[in-house]
Image (tube, rainbow, N blue to C red):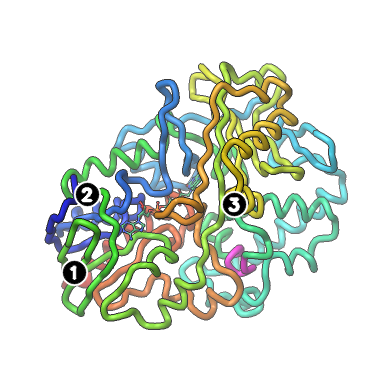
């Protein structure tokens, strides 16, 4: 699978071996055509990466699978990737106003006014999201109004308590790795619509954080990659796509692939960094200029046992003090060792890319210790990964749209341009931003590309 100056020829050339590109290749082949995938990194999986610590596999990228993510569940079953529930026995914790409070369920006990505020906010957002068509959010009856404001502006007018707004800000950090002021209200509503409802995005039991892969989601992606054998070319960053109505020549470092169609399965901002010959219409380029990635640093601290369980804690916690926004028990299925995971998101995810990893470790471990007690201050191992610093991701969890983008440029997300088709979780209609959405997008782009071959 070495890319040294090799030439490839296939019906469809796919750029990117994240789940979207891998799913596209499998679907192209299932539909009876040939595919080759050019991947910049020296591994498949993109935003999924499992690392080994003391013989166990742990995800520094995407990890959870939840109900209704059926495409991912089918892929996992086919490749024998087993799942287990996220540890959820006991109470969660929240750090707010300088206090640490325990609670059960998704939403902390914050006093009746705050709870009512959060409840009415989620109810309103779910009701509005139902009016946003997943395939074409720009056609929502109030699309222009909703796409002309940030989520922050909407919260200012619709939320009445300071702590309710703070919780909402943390929830937005947890789902988009961005701040409410970054994200168009229409995008937020579309995202809720594509998942089903807001609770599904936020919940552990019954939601997107319900289960984990025993050997890691990155390991599953790696296996899917291996199944493509020599049709997956690693270490081949694509630089240029020459395209005509009949075909493409895709030039990567060390590899050239010729095909009848291309599927570009990378986040929009990275798709905009590839050179196209002839250049793409302004309409598409203006979209890729306007779809930033969120910023997240995922932090894992390892201990000899999950000691917080004996203290009646699930390991799930929210902090309004930070720098971590969300924390979870990330121990292996058999609980043979204790692992806490925490996320630096939104403005923390941006600012803390600029300090050393040693300083991050100090801040993160300090946050764990405030929530889980002094034993958390002394992990025997610590790992973190800043996704904005990754050359071939440039951020995470997802590319989102600021105001004005979906209504002006939305259709350019998926509309093929000549022989080039677009995939990637950002183009998904179901579970946009998630692994399941990545698979949906790859399968859709493959069907589109193959059917255009006639
Ligand atoms: C920390 C973190 C936590 C997450 N948690 C979850 C979770 O719990 N559950 C969930 O469902 N999702 C989660 N996600 C999101 C999930 O990982 C993504 O939605 C999904 O992996 C996206 O797949 P993709 O194929 O669309 O894109 P990517 O995985 O980004 O794949 C794109 C691929 O293209 C390659 N590439 C880029 N540019 C080029 C180029 N020019 N030439 C060749 N190759 C190129 C990249 O290297 C990459 O392999 C998380 C993500 C992160 C980072």
Q: Secondary structure at mark 3?
A: helix
The residue tagged 2 is 232
The answer to whether residue 360 is seen in the rendering is yes
Residue 444: x percent and y percent?
Answer: 33, 62
Q: Nearer the viewer, mark 2 or mark 3?
A: 2
Whether label 2 touches label 3, CB < 8 Å: no
Q: Which mark is residue 249?
A: 1
- Camera-near label (1 vs 3) is 1
Q: Which residue is mark 3?
A: 175
The residue nearer to you, when weighing 357 against 328, is 357
Q: Earlier in the sequence, mark 1 or mark 3?
A: 3
Graded by Cα atoms within 10 Å as few (under 14), some (14 to 19) or many (20 or more), the crowding at tag 1 reads many
Does the magenta run of residues contain 187?
yes
Residue at image location 37% in from the left, 60% down from the top: 266
Looking at the rendering, the stretch of residues picked out in magenta corresponds to 183-189
Relative vertical location of residue 58 with respect to residue 417 in this rendering, above or below: above
Q: Is residue 179 left or right of residue 331?
A: right
Left or right of 330? Residue 46 is left
> Which residue shows up at 42% across the image and 44% down it?
48
Q: Quadrant of residue 374?
A: top right
Q: Is residue 172 visible?
A: no
Disc 2 packing (10 Å; few <14; some 14–19; many ≥20): many
- Dot 1 lies on which element? strand
């Amino acid at each position: 699978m070495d890319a040294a100056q090799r030439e490839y020829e296939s019906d469809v050339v796919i750029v990117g071996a994240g789940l979207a590109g891998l799913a596209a290749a499998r679907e192209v082949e299932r539909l009876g055509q040939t595919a080759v995938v050019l991947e910049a990194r020296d591994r498949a999986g993109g935003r999924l990466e499992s690392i080994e610590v003391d013989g166990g596999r742990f995800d520094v990228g995407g990890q959870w699978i939840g109900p209704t993510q059926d495409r991912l569940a089918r892929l996992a079953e086919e490749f024998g990737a087993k799942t287990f529930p996220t540890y959820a026995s006991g109470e969660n914790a929240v750090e707010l106003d300088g206090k640490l409070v325990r609670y059960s369920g998704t939403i902390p006990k914050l006093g009746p006014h705050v709870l009512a505020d959060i409840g009415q906010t989620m109810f309103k957002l779910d009701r509005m999201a139902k009016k946003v068509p997943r395939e074409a959010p720009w056609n929502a009856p109030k699309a222009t109004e909703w796409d002309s404001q940030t989520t922050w502006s909407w919260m200012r007018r619709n939320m009445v308590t300071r702590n309710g707004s703070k919780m909402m800000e943390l929830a937005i950090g947890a789902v988009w790795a961005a701040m409410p002021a970054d994200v168009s209200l229409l995008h937020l509503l579309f995202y809720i619509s594509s998942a089903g409802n807001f609770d599904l995005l936020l919940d552990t039991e019954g939601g997107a954080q319900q289960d984990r892969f025993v050997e890691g989601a990155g390991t599953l992606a790696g296996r899917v990659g291996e199944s493509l054998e020599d049709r997956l070319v690693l270490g081949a960053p694509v630089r240029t796509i020459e395209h005509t109505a009949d075909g493409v020549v895709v030039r990567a470092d060390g590899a050239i692939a010729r095909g009848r169609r291309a599927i570009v399965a990378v986040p929009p901002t990275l798709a905009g960094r590839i050179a196209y010959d002839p250049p793409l219409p302004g309409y598409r380029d203006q979209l890729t200029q306007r779809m930033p990635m969120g910023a997240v640093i995922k932090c894992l601290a390892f201990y000899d046992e999950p000691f917080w369980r004996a203290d009646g804690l699930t390991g799930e916690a929210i902090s309004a003090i930070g720098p971590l926004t969300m924390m979870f028990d990330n121990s292996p299925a058999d609980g043979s060792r204790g692992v806490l995971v925490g996320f630096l998101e939104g403005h923390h995810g941006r600012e803390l890319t600029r300090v050393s990893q040693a300083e991050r470790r100090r801040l993160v471990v300090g946050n764990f210790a405030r929530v889980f007690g002094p034993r958390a201050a002394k992990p025997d191992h610590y790992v973190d990964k800043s996704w904005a610093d990754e050359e071939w991701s440039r951020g995470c969890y997802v590319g989102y749209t600021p105001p004005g983008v979906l209504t002006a440029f939305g259709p350019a997300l998926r509309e093929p341009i000549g022989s080039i088709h677009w995939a990637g979780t950002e183009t998904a209609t179901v579970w946009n931003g998630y692994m399941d959405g990545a698979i949906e997008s790859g399968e859709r782009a493959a069907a589109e590309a193959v059917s255009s071959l006639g």
